[in-house]
Amino acid sequence: MKKILLKNGTIIDGKKDEPIFHHSVLIQDGKIVKIAENISEDTDTLVIDCTYKYIMPGMIDCHVHIDLDPEVDMNQALLEDTNVMYVIKAIDRLKKYLPAGFTTIRINGGMEHLATSLRDSVNQKIISGPRIIAAGQYLSITGGHGAFFSPWVNVQNHMCKVVDGPDELRKAIRHQVWSKVDVIKFFNTGGACDPNSNLQAQEFSDEELKMIVSEAKRAFKRTSTHAHGTVGIKSAAKAGVDSIEHASMLDEECIQIIKDKGIFIVPTLKASYEIMAHKAGLPGYIVEKASNLVENCKQSFGMAYEAGINIAMGTDSGTPFNYHGENAKELELMVQYGMSCMDAIKCSTSRAAENLAIDNIVGSIEAGKCADLLLLSENPLNDIRVLQKQECIQMVMKDGSIEVNRLS
């Protein structure tokens, strides 16, 4: 593969607290091989002048639902769309990520085999898209957030696997490991987008939570839990889950447990924000639940940031009006709620990679790592909203391949 030299740019490497000025990045065979102030070039090198431009790692979204349409009622879609239609629509949504600067996503639960199949299709270059970390079906208790429908509607085991008790959980997790998932995703409180569950209620018992975490760890799989309410957050943290999604209602005890265990939280601030911004077009029960979340999310995020908890960026894209490809709005909300621009960038690069256990290959600009890079025309440290403007994302590189080129 031809060498590429990104010459004389300002590097925001995803780890350091300050940018590196007037440096170049040499890329060969898909990897970053050298970062230095002066790098010699030869006739076999594609040189891209980055003077007055900014080089940063490709962004990572740790919480995406590629099988969900933000403008369509999820329950209605489950009743009307075939599995084949779900796949076709998911492939179309996947196309929105690289142009928006996202070179890695975690598809954090959904239709069985969809995320793993998309991951393998991208890896085999059958389709184009971001690097994918794949969860399987959500795990839910009977009547929990993942049940979606009332008990008289017979729609089961589509996007969600309903399991009760350690034995059922053990079998379900082993089946997902057999299906080659990267992460085990489960619900531990209710959610905003179903009419029946309770945001505050813990769903899996403490015994069941221990089974989920221990069985996943035995297979070297990470765990991710949906948890809004304090009791559900706390119980999952005590069990040793790897990442807590939403973490909307933290208290001081939650904070301490999460910090002591080194657990990541993925705040998904954008999910409730978009619901409230478009509440006129949504069912009342969704708006009522989301209205209880917005201020709690803001307060919990501030507490977590101040305490130095591990925070990784995720959007919950696919939930109502939470559009695929508009993921960088999450960074604006993080900054609006008190985080520095540099820390927001870290949350969407190196820290997100650490949360997904892929920080050995992506997430920062370091020699030996995959060349997943963005070239920006404006400085996101001055205005984080730069990352929402595709015209400012002049180039997107994944594994050393230029996937998007907007350079004139």
Image (cartoon, rainbow, N blue to C red):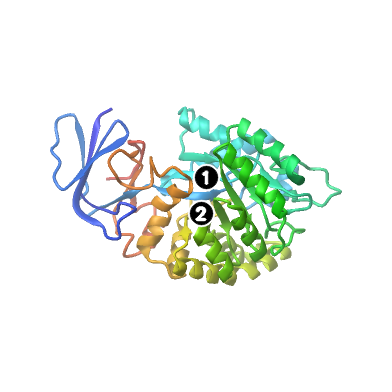
Q: Residue 39 has which mark?
A: none
Residue toward you, 393 or 106: 106
Residue toward you, 35 or 203: 203
Q: Residue 314 has which mark?
A: 2
Residue toward you, 15 or 64: 15
Q: Position of residue 223 (x, y in %)?
A: 58, 46
Q: With 115 as the anchor, is 157 left or right in this view?
A: right
Give the Cα distance between marks 1 and 2: 9 Å
Q: With 118 as the anchor, is 207 left or right in this view?
A: right
In the rendered image, the vertical position of residue 385 relative to residue 158, given as above or below: below
The quadrant of the picture occupied by the N terminus is top left
Circle 2 SS class: loop
Q: Specify few, some or many for label 1: CA neighbours under 10 Å numbering under 14, 14-19, or 20 or more.
A: many
Q: Amino acid at mark 1?
A: Arg
Q: Specify few, some or many for label 2: CA neighbours under 10 Å numbering under 14, 14-19, or 20 or more.
A: many
Question: In the image, what residue occupies the spot 75% across and 49% down?
Answer: 141
Q: Are marks 1 and 2 in contact (CB under 8 Å)?
A: yes
Q: Position of residue 61 (x, y in %)?
A: 48, 50
The residue labelled by disc 1 is 106
Q: Position of residue 122 (x, y in %)?
A: 48, 33
